[in-house]
Image: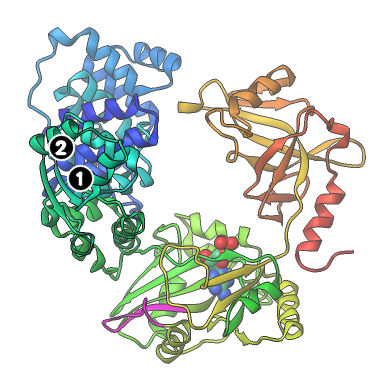
């Protein structure tokens, strides 16, 4: 398949902001792509050549890109850098430069999707001496063979910044659209379809057209023309319900129904099958290939592969502990550990570790690999637990922040292993010795887990459990969890099946102390790059100390919308507000005179040596501006942050 076709689709996607429009374009592209090329096309449209869990990176930095563009197009590095300064987009720079010298360019070979994909992958794996030059050659070769539009997207993909906005939801909906008959029951949409000029295949519920004619929604001549132009089969609802909506089997582009209940059901089945496959194999490239080749059946049969991560079950919030335990007939309480979720995959002696966001952390935790080898008796299995950092001296749990240093550590792993040893609390099992456990009750999964693991207390152990319906006992367990510096508790349904990838009612309920929002001052920031060029990106938050000085206590980057949205606060808006108060600039960093107060929500307050206040907010996000009603002197104080910090552990004043 030619890369040019993909580049044109990318162009269309870039200029189509609406999600529905994007879905249409992607669906068309998927339909036109041969099944064998689907995995590559789907990854490329998401701006990558690796599945989401891969830690491989193409590894070309901006500075390197200047050199590559300069040498492949014969233009000075200064010129490239100058143009980049203006647009903040190397893709555009390459397109512009090539456009202006198009006549002179001799395309050496037509680029195919395979060539682009292979070169990008090779670029990522090259290591060792002279690797930078070899990487540059591979990308240079692609640019040299590209037309301006292709070059734009090759450059952007190389830098990991494709900017065509194909989110996972779009790919999912497009897979549904491309490979399954669209089930339609809304009158308005049916009428649109009947009036359309396109030639399509329909399966329509018997009597539906007569009904629309009677209601005067359609005219006889329209229906006649529709039947003439399209392939139309009319069938009773009972027969339609038995149809497999996979296009290859249904031999239809549309199934039109009068019955909305049946329509909803058919549509739901397809979306759920696509989602299921994605939860098992979180790579839409693979899911698209399965959908195209083996439809609903194939999607439903998708199973996790040992060694590759899957999308884990998530928890829902519960308003109170009492509420949570009374939600289930058979409830069990576990501490909600303040650590990192880990999927442990084991096949013989080989062990892989993944986070819930599918990051491969096997290399960062050789100690856990070792524990799994020693402690797991099953030959093959996939089990889950929470990693906690513990103090090397006392064995007491350490704040998550310290553990997070280990998660991201690439070097000196042995050394941090000694500084921050770990403890794993195991709480679930989804696969053991050839069998899936997704459709087994939690009680059974836990039993199996206990039967295949040899505990090593304090290191590799089962999550503590309390089965109770008694509010007082539950409260005691909860308080104890908080005292031990855990986040709260998880209340689980012993009869629930494992539903991957979901926050489901009937599964897990988390109970933790609610955190009050803080009103903080913005006291610094960083000028953004890429999409955020010209805006202040990360913003430094400060709380007031007794003398009126503002002390940093967190950094905000999310929760601020890139585009204007009702009620939301945008980067643009904040930049406009903050710009007049900038008092110092150094590189891209700015210092801001405390004047703008924002209300901030967050997950947790942690002790932190990195911020002058001694505290750091975890996952802070702007809820709203308080500029109208609060000045800096009304911002929250360090004492309040301290107080809230203590409250988290049930140790309020
Ligand atoms: P949240 O991130 O607030 O949605 O809570 C869900 C997370 O809590 C899971 O992904 C786990 O990392 C973590 N967790 C801590 N303790 C447990 C437990 N006993 N059972 C399940 N998840 C737990």
Q: Residue furthest bottom?
A: 451
The CB of the residue at mark 2 lies under 8 Å from ligand 1: no
| Secondary structure category for the residue under label 2 | helix
Out of 237 and 591, give the one closest to the viewer.
237
Q: Which of marks 2 and 1 is nearer the N terminus?
A: 1
Residue visible at 71% across and 26% down?
591
Instruction: Residue 220: name its quadrant.
Output: top left
Q: Which of 90 and 480 is in front in this view?
A: 480
Question: Which residue in the structure is indicated by mark 2?
Answer: 113
425 displayed left or right of 368: right
In the rendered image, the vertical position of residue 629 relative to residue 313, given as above or below: above
Pick out the residue farthest to the front: 214
Q: Position of residue 10 (x, y in %)?
A: 27, 30
Q: In this view, does 357 lie to the left or right of 617?
A: left
497 on left or right of 479: left
Quick check: 223 left or right of 188? left
Q: Quadrant of ligand 1?
A: bottom right
The stretch of residues the image draws in magenta is 428-440
Q: Do the residues labelled 2 and 1 touch (CB within 8 Å)?
A: yes
Query: Dot 1 corresponds to which residue?
Result: 40
Distance CA(mark 2)–CA(mark 1):
8 Å
Q: Give the quarter of the figure containing the N terminus.
A: top left
Is residue 294 positioned above or below 551 on the image?
A: below
Viewer can see residue 652 = yes
């Amino acid at each position: 398949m030619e890369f040019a076709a993909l580049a044109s689709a990318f162009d269309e996607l870039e200029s189509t902001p609406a999600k529905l429009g994007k879905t249409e374009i992607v669906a068309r592209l998927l339909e036109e792509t041969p099944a064998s090329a689907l995995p590559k096309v789907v990854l490329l449209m998401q701006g990558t050549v690796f599945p989401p869990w891969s830690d491989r990176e193409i590894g070309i930095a901006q500075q390197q890109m200047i050199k590559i563009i300069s040498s492949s197009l014969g233009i000075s590095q200064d010129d490239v850098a100058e143009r980049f300064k203006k647009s903040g987009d190397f893709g555009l720079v390459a397109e512009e430069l090539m456009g202006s010298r198009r006549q002179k360019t001799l395309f050496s070979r037509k680029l195919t999707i395979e060539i682009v994909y292979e070169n990008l992958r090779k670029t990522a794996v090259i290591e060792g001496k002279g690797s930078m030059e070899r990487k540059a050659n591979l990308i240079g070769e692609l640019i040299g063979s590209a037309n301006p539009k292709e070059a734009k997207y090759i450059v952007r993909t190389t830098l990991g910044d494709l900017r065509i906005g194909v989110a996972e939801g779009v790919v999912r909906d497009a897979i549904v659209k491309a490979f399954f008959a669209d089930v339609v029951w809304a009158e308005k949409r049916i009428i649109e379809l009947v009036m359309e000029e396109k030639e399509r295949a329909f399966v329509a519920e018997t009597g539906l057209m007569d009904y629309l004619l009677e209601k005067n929604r359609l005219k006889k001549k329209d229906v006649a023309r529709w039947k003439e132009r399209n392939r139309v089969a009319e069938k009773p609802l009972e027969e339609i319900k038995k149809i497999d909506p996979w296009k290859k089997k249904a031999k239809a582009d549309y199934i039109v129904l009068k019955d909305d209940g049946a329509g909803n059901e058919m549509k739901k089945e397809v979306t759920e099958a696509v989602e299921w496959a994605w939860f098992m194999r979180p790579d839409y490239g693979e899911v698209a290939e399965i959908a195209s080749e083996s439809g609903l059946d194939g999607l439903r049969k998708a199973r996790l592969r040992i060694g590759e991560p899957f999308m884990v079950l998530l928890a829902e919030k519960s308003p109170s502990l009492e509420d949570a335990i009374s939600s289930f007939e058979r409830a069990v309480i576990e501490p909600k550990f303040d650590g990192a979720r880990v999927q442990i995959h084991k096949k013989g002696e080989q062990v892989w570790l993944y986070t819930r966001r599918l990051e491969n952390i096997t290399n960062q935790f050789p100690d856990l690999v070792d524990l799994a080898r020693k402690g797991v008796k099953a030959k093959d299995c996939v089990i889950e637990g929470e990693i906690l950092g513990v103090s090397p001296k006392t064995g007491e749990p350490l704040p998550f922040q310290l553990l997070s240093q280990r998660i991201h550590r690439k070097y000196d792993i042995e050394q941090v292993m000694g500084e921050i040893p770990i403890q794993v609390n195991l709480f679930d099992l989804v696969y053991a010795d050839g069998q899936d456990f997704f459709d087994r009750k939690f009680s059974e999964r836990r039993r199996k887990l206990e039967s295949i693991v040899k505990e090593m207390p304090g290191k590799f152990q089962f999550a503590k459990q309390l089965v109770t319906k008694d509010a007082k006992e539950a409260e005691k367990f909860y308080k104890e969890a908080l005292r031990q510096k855990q986040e709260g508790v998880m209340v689980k349904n012993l009869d629930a099946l494992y539903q991957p990838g979901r926050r489901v009612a009937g599964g897990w309920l988390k109970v933790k102390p609610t955190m009050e929002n803080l009103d903080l001052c913005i006291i610094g920031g960083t000028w953004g790059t890429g999409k955020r060029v010209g805006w202040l990106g990360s913003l430094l938050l400060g709380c007031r100390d007794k003398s009126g000085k503002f002390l940093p206590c967190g950094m905000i980057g999310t929760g601020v919308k890139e585009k204007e949205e009702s009620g939301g606060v945008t980067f643009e808006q904040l930049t406009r507000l903050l710009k007049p108060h900038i008092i110092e600039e150094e590189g891209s960093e700015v210092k801001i005179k405390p004047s703008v107060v924002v209300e901030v929500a967050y997950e947790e307050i942690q002790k932190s040596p990195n911020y002058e206040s001694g505290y750091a907010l975890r996952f802070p996000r702007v809820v709203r501006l308080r500029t109208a009603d609060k000045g800096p002197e009304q911002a929250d104080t360090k004492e309040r942050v301290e107080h809230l910090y203590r409250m988290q552990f049930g140790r309020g004043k």
